[in-house]
Every structure is written in C-alpha cells, then in structure tokens.
Image (cartoon, rainbow, N blue to C red):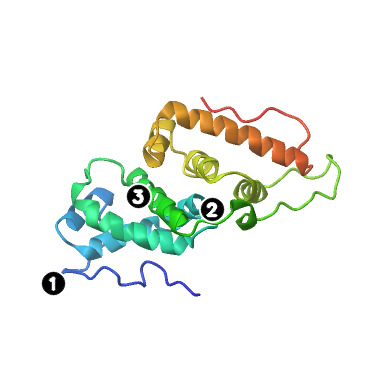
Amino acid sequence: MTHATLAEQRTISPPHGNAIIDAIELDDRGLVVRAQAGDAHAFGLLLRRYERRLLAVARRAAGGEAEPEDVVQDAALKAWTAIGRFDPDRPLAPWLFTVTVRVARTHRGRHRRRRLLLLRAPQPANRDATGPAPTEDSIWSVVDACLPPQQRIALWLRYGERLDAPAIAAALDTNATAVRAVLARARRSLRRHLEQQGAIDDGREPHDA
C-alpha cells in the first residue's frame, strides 16, 4: 500500500480562514502557540518539520509489527488532541517522540506476532576479520534485525537523535537509571552480534556517561 506523506494527508482540517503561515519566520514555539489556538495549518507545519525524525523513531519502536507511516499518522492525531496541554516553552521533539513511542506500543499490542518471525535475519559474514569496518547503515541494520524493541528505540534516541538519558526516559516511561542500563545491555548485545557476523573482532564497546 502506498502511503501519502503527512503533508499530503488531510486528517486534520484547518479552521475557518487561517492565513498561510511562513514556516521560515516562525520557530517551533510560535507554531505551537498558534496550534494551541486552533490553527491546524500551524500544526501541519510542525509535522512536516519532524516527519522524517518521527518515522525513524516509529520504525524502531514498532519493530516490524506495524507500518511506521500508520504509527506516525496516529501519533499526529494524538498530538493534535493533546497540543493544548503542551508547554510551549519545552522542547517539542522529545514530546513528539514520547507520543510516537506510546502509539507504536499500542500498534504492537494490536498486531502481536512472534518477534523472531518478523525481524530480518542477519546475513552471514563471508569474509575474515581483516575486512572493511561496518558502515553506520550496516550497524543500524543489525540493530533493527537483532535487538528487542526497547533496546532499538533507546539506541536510536541516544545516537540517532542524541537525546540524553532523562529525555529518553520520558519517551520510554521509565527513569534515567533504567535507560542507562538498557543502553549498556544494547551496546553489549550489538557488539556480540557484530562479532558473530565477523564485522568486528576486538575493541571496546562505546561508553555513554
């Protein structure tokens, strides 16, 4: 099924006679304030700014059990209904990530399947340990194929979005100490899978203070 972008989908109808907003002149806070006043066009501009990042979060949070585009679309509706309660002086991205992760969990519950059948099987490494180092894309492919959803999304929020532990904790409904533990387990597990595939042979795992 072909999915339209959020900008093309008209799930949220603009209110009467809103003027076109210049996205270049308004920062996130300005658009949030307008959205809280009922301006759906301003909210649509916010979604366009964050669409690719939300899709990346949804892809890892859904873990193959839901279409990322469907997760983001439902998250957009949730965020629209809750935007009035959002503090415009707070950073917007972590809040949108939180909404997206929660919606992805709901989708996983609706479409519960055996995870091992849904995850992509890692390809065997047909080379010795002196071969080229793994690329960033190949590392994320191993993350997506081999790690459980909580570890995948934690790694992405930390290294893809560069959020700190407290912000990740808010998105995952946990605490910073638990996040650091999840990240440590995820890094160990990732190193083990990369070693098994022959992608790396030695070296320390990344350290995150």
Q: Residues within 10 Å of mark 3 (few under 14, many from 20)?
A: many
Left or right: residue 151 versus residue 82 is: right
- Regarding mark 2 in the picture, which secondary structure is present there? loop
Measured as percent of width and height from the top left, residue 120 is found at 65, 56
Q: Residue at x 44, y 38 (%)?
A: 163
Left or right: residue 89 versus residue 59 is: left
Measured as percent of width and height from the top left, residue 128 is found at 86, 43
Please tell me whether mark 1 or mark 3 is closer to you in this view.
Answer: 3
Count of numbered tags: 3
Amino acid type at circle 2 is Gly
Q: Residue at x 23, y 52 (%)?
A: 83
Tell me if label 1 and label 2 are in contact, CB under 8 Å.
Answer: no
Q: Which residue is mark 3?
A: 99
Left or right: residue 28 versus residue 189 is: left
- Residue 63, labelled with which disc? 2
**Which comes before the other along the chain, label 1 or label 2?**
1
- Residue 16, labelled with which disc? 1
Q: Is residue 130 visible?
A: yes
Measured as percent of width and height from the top left, residue 113 is found at 55, 57
Q: Residue at x 71, y 45 (%)?
A: 134
Q: Is residue 183 above or below residue 98?
A: above
